[in-house]
Amino acid sequence: MELLKKFIFGLIILLLVVKFIYSQGWYSITITNNQNISTPAPFQQDIAICNGNVNIGHNFAYINNVTLFNEIDSNGQNVYFVNSSGNILYSWYEGQLNYNGVYCDVWWINLPNGISANSNITIYMYIGNSSDNYYSQYYPYVGASSQVISGYDNGQDVFIAYGYFDNTFDGWSGYDYYGFWSPKATPLGIEMLNNGQNEGTYILPPNNWNIPKIPLIVEEAWWYTFGGQSNVISLFGNTNQQINVSLIGNTSSDNTPASNLSTFVQFDYYSGITYLKSAVTNQILSFIPFYEYWGTIYSYLIINSTYAQTGYYIYSPFALVWAPLTLLDTYTVNNNGYTYSSLNYNPYQYPTLEISAGDGYPEMSHSETSYQYVEWVVARAYPPNDVMPSISIQPVSISSTQTTSTVTTSTSTVTQTSTITTTVTTTLTSTYTITSTLTVYSTITTTTTVTSSVTATSTTTSTVYTTVTSTSIVYNTVTSTVTTTLTSTSTVISTVYTTLISTLTSTSTIYSTITSTQTVTSTVYTTVTTTVTSTSTTTSIVSPSIYSIIQTLTGSSFTQTIPSTSYIYPINQVSSITIINLNSSNISTSYIYSCSSNMT
């Protein structure tokens, strides 16, 4: 009965192994770069699984697969990615994008070697049960945005540069360029300006001076209050030498810094202009309007070897809120203006990135001071020709072959007879009792060979300790002889279990077909106990133990009361704008400002 229980237990274990293999949610992902130039290396590839079709543009790679979409946990914790060698890849779950009612789960994957021109690579995605948490198991390789789940943000392992500034610098460093205010971490982001006059500050990522000189896009979310003056993104300049941005092209932004020899964008909300500038050639490359709305802004700067581009999107006018990181997917469709310029110089001067801000001083007619906060910054490799490599996802096929298992029991009995003669000779003149004791050591060796689907040999050695006591009553001279016959019987029961011997074959589709074979091996331990007794016969039954080794397949809104409340009523196609200053409930002052007829 005991043997039957162990046999059944072994079969259950085997079935669980097979079931686990069959239920694995492995999918191959083919990533295709159909451009005539390679991607940068490293390269950040987006993987999006949607429950419908989205029309965001060629800079967003996705598939429409409702079945896969429904298998993914709401915070993406049951998904991870590996390369073709089975090594886990750094992945960052952005969250769930909602675009015109279509939802997409979006990941960013760090591909260290990029993708060559007109070629493709294959990686693998595993989708586990909804209760699986690969963040806790594989972090920092597997992580997610702080807007999705706290404690597992690995953005700095995935992107070129990354910072999420919810009451933290997130490893970045803050510096004072002019005045007495220095950047401060707050629950609203890094406070760059504190509404004081003549302030100038900047922040640098922890890997500054190690930013790769490759085509990059830097994306930023920030907000400001009404007034002045600027927010700046600088790339590839000397951050040890700061310059005043107003010196390039004689523009405003009195105390806003930028790194020397950089190419940068200046969002001047005092003048209402976005400037694309070069500190290499000391000139304005291009510009577009930047309206003086106060609110939450998404902005970006793109630089490659031949051109630069910048743009912005007013995510929340007249409201100070946290901008979602899903804006990373939509800059091509969500924008309120962009501009670009060809470059006739090498923009890759220094391996650096800088975010900066500055203001001026209060005036009677228009304050040049403001509050400004930076919420997050993401820098990633820019796809070739602004085209993100496409993706296709296919399930990995799995086949299984099981070898029949057997149980064989062999019993052997060995009997050994030992004859021992003891002679004691004593010469006495009177009656004595003589007791003679002998200890006999006898060794019995039994070898049993059993052949099943495996061959097991057990060797048993039995050592017999026999004590013989002879008592003789002697009168005068007597020779006493004691003869003792020992018969020992050794019963050996050798049971060999081969229940867990099975072969599992896993077939994966890689380019054409990759076949991997995995063998689950059971180690058989046979324990034999033999007892040999004298005079009486004792039989010991052996209870063998089985150990199995099973190898698993690799398988917010924020509302702030503005101290001095001003409200703008835009008027189209007229020559002036009336700005009414409200103090408590009384109208105290009205001003009339001239403006161009095409201002909105």
Image: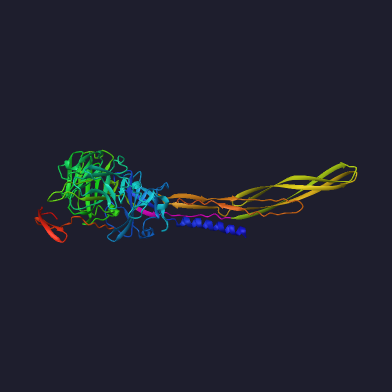
Q: Which residue lies at the image location 19% right of the left edge and 52% below the top edge?
A: 337
Q: Is residue 428 above or below residue 15?
A: above
Q: Is residue 160 above or below residue 571?
A: above
**Count of labels in the image:** 0
Whether the magenta-drawn stretch holds residue 483 is answered as no
In the image: residue 341, left or right of residue 436: left
Q: Main secondary structure of the magenta part?
A: loop
Pick whichever, 2 or 332, lies toward us.
Answer: 2
Q: Which residues are magenta?
A: 392-405
Quarter of the image that includes the N terminus: bottom right
Specify the color scheme: rainbow
Residue 257: % across, % down = 21, 42
Pick whichever, 180 or 568, lies toward us.
Answer: 180
In the image: residue 6, left or right of residue 226: right
Residue 301: % across, % down = 24, 47
Residue 566: % across, % down = 16, 56
Whether the magenta-drawn stretch holds residue 393 is answered as yes
Q: Which residue lies at the image location 45% right of the left edge and 57% below the top edge?
A: 23
In the image: residue 72, left or right of residue 349: right
Quarter of the image that includes the C terminus: bottom left
